[in-house]
Amino acid sequence: MAQRKKSKTPTKPKMSEMISEMAVGFLGVGDSIGERQNRLNAACTAWNMACGSPLVRQRQLDQYRQGYLRFNPATSPADFANILKDMELLIERKLTLFPDDKRQIVDARVVKVGDSFRIEVASAALE
């Protein structure tokens, strides 16, 4: 029986592990799977924004602000400020923890497993 050769290139950590590390303390908030999914979506958006240049990142954050208010007009100014602060902190954490990883997240799901939750993340490399 042929043996598999070990790869000489180190394997990258799983994207789900990196998102969990980047958004520690952020993803676990929420009683329902829907609330957790919303938080995961925000963390993935922050990850993708962080992959761009500072100029692109700022433009995307401005678009996020405008879009959020358009689709959530009842959000109070205080809540909106907290949401933006969370996004900025998530972007900074991604840049600090994984500055060279430019993979884009194309799908992410919260999955209930027994009494706990796990996340599944699909990504694609940018050329």
Image (cartoon, rainbow, N blue to C red):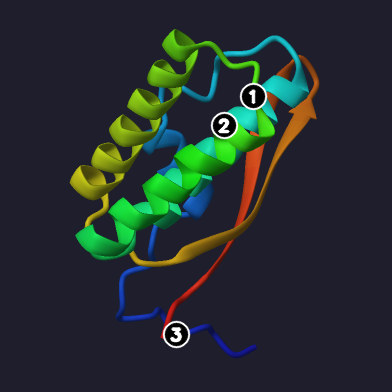
The answer to the question of whether label 3 and label 2 lie on touching residues, with beta carbons closer than 8 A, is no
| Amino acid at the residue labelled 2 | Leu
Quadrant location of residue 68? top right
Question: Secondary structure under badge 1?
Answer: loop
Q: Is residue 95 left or right of residue 47?
A: left
In this rendering, the label closer to the viewer, 3 or 2: 2
Mark 2 — residue? 69
Question: On the rendered structure, is 56 left or right of 106?
Answer: left
CA separation in Å, label 3 and label 1:
56 Å
Q: Secondary structure at mark 3?
A: loop
Q: Quadrant of residue 31?
A: top right
Q: Amino acid at mark 3?
A: Lys
Q: Which residue is mark 3?
A: 5
- In the rendered structure, the answer to whether residue 37 lies left or right of residue 56 reads right
Residue situated in front as seen by the camera: 126 or 62: 62
> Residue 65, how many percent across, how many down?
46, 38
In the rendered image, the vertical position of residue 9 relative to residue 54, given as above or below: below
Relative to 53, say whether 93 is above or below: above
Comparing 35 with 60, the one in front is 60
> Sequence order check: which comes first, mark 3 or mark 1?
3
- In percent of width and height, residue 117 lies at 68, 25
Q: Quadrant of the N terminus?
A: bottom right
Q: Which mark is residue 73?
A: 1
Pointers 1 and 2 in contact (CB under 8 A)?
A: yes
Q: Looking at numbered disc 1 in the image, what kind of residue is underneath it?
A: Pro
Question: Residue at 39% of width from left, 34% of height from top?
Answer: 87
Front tag of 3 and 1: 1
* Element on which disc 2 rests: helix
